[in-house]
Image (cartoon, rainbow, N blue to C red):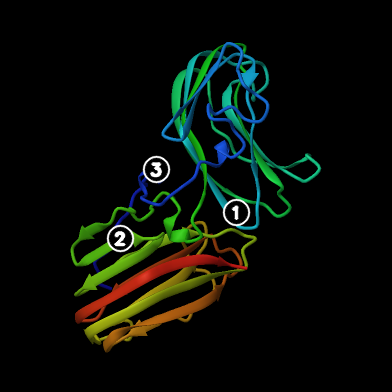
């Protein structure tokens, strides 16, 4: 089918325009040292724009603790690692790295999470999205130089609580939070929710990663539209098209019950619907658009959240 589609690329959370607090600093002093730490032998910590900048010699690490509350569902870690002559040890963890794990209330490790690492003379930018596992009491984030020599530099390190709106998470094809204009589609953020205006034929497509332990997701929005004329097929109208896909982007499960609109509705009307996630689903492809032959449609407060 003919349609205008928009491709989106990664935009760092620091540029998202969404207010964030660096959770690494929750239990830190004004200089960025956590707990009872007030110095770092042969190393250093500096705070710049509420982000941590550390230099760690071989054999040094420092641990930051983030307590998990019921409101914390997803965490985003960002920053950059730079190795300056780091010589790796015999074990695969003996290098420069961010060593992170979720712990239980008794202090025992619940889950080790994927980490970034460097050695030799190299740099690596980090963006990690962590889904909080059931039973997690806290997340420990440990910048560390476990190498036998060299210095690890960590720049702009931050961990933030991701917005509940899954559209606002900084995944690989995230919608730019500063807004965009392309062809007939305009999109922007207001308080972590997406606002979309489509004047004529056009659409905005987004693949949202879903996790195996999620049971359902909830779509919510409000809309108004004018002079939307039905095209020559039943899908050619103003609509929000949803479909679950597997890891190879093949459709799984039945077509969800999609919203569709024709004609004119001058006043804003609010909608909400919950979609059960079928087995083997890895993504939810969602596409608000106007596939009719003419007209204008607006979707505001557009959000997709995890349904408890």
Q: Position of residue 300 (x, y in %)?
A: 35, 71
Q: Earlier in the sequence, mark 3 or mark 2?
A: 3
In the image, 304 versus 243, the foreground residue is 304
In the picture, measured across the screen, residue 85 lies left or right of residue 58, that is left
In the image, 171 versus 169, the foreground residue is 169
> How many neighbours does mark 1 have within 10 angstroms: few (below 14), some (14-19), or many (20 or more)?
some
In the image, 114 versus 130, the foreground residue is 130
Q: Is residue 236 visible?
A: no
Q: Which residue is drawn at the image coordinates 18% and 63% (left, top)? A: 183
Q: Earlier in the sequence, mark 1 or mark 2?
A: 1
In the picture, measured across the screen, residue 242 lies left or right of residue 99, that is left
* Residue position marked by numbered label 1 in the rendering: 72
Q: Position of residue 303 (x, y in %)?
A: 44, 67
> How many neighbours does mark 3 have within 10 angstroms: few (below 14), some (14-19), or many (20 or more)?
few
Q: Earlier in the sequence, mark 1 or mark 3?
A: 3
Q: Position of residue 294 (x, y in %)?
A: 18, 81
What is the residue that sits farthest to the front in this orientation? Answer: 30
Mark number displayed over residue 188: 2
Q: Which residue is drawn at the image coordinates 50% and 37% (left, top)? A: 158
Check the image and report above or below for 155 versus 292. Answer: above
In the picture, measured across the screen, residue 221 lies left or right of residue 8, that is right
* Residue position marked by numbered label 3 in the rendering: 14
- Assess whether mark 2 and mark 1 are in contact (beta carbons under 8 angstroms): no
Q: Which residue is drawn at the image coordinates 60% and 13% (left, top)? A: 58
């Amino acid at each position: 089918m003919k349609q205008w589609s928009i491709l989106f690329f990664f935009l760092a959370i620091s540029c998202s325009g969404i207010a964030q607090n660096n959770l690494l600093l929750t239990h830190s002093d004004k200089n960025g040292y956590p707990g009872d730490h007030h110095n770092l032998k042969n190393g250093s910590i500096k705070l710049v724009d509420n982000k941590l900048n550390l230099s760690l010699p071989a054999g040094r690490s420092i641990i930051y603790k983030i307590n998990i509350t019921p409101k914390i569902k997803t965490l985003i870690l960002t920053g950059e690692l730079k190795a300056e002559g780091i010589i790796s040890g015999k074990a695969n963890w003996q290098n420069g790295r961010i060593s992170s794990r979720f712990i239980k209330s008794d202090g025992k490790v619940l889950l080790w999470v994927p980490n970034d690492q460097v050695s030799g003379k190299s740099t690596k930018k980090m963006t990690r999205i962590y889904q909080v596992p059931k039973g997690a009491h806290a997340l420990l984030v440990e910048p560390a130089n476990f190498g036998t020599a060299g210095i690890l530099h960590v720049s702009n390190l931050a961990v933030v609580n991701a917005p509940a709106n899954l559209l606002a998470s900084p995944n690989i094809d995230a919608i730019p939070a500063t807004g965009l204009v392309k062809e007939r589609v305009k999109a922007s953020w207001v308080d972590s929710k997406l606002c979309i205006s489509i004047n004529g034929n056009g659409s905005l497509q987004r693949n949202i990663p879903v996790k195996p332990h999620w049971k359902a997701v909830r779509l919510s929005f409000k809309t108004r539209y004018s002079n939307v004329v039905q095209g020559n097929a039943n899908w050619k109208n103003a609509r929000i098209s949803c479909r679950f896909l597997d890891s190879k982007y093949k459709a799984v499960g039945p077509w969800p019950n999609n919203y569709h609109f024709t004609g004119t509705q001058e006043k804003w009307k609010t909608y909400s619907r919950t979609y059960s996630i079928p087995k083997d689903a890895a993504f939810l492809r969602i596409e608000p658009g106007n596939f009719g032959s003419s007209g204008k449609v607006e979707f505001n407060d557009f959000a997709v959240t995890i349904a408890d």
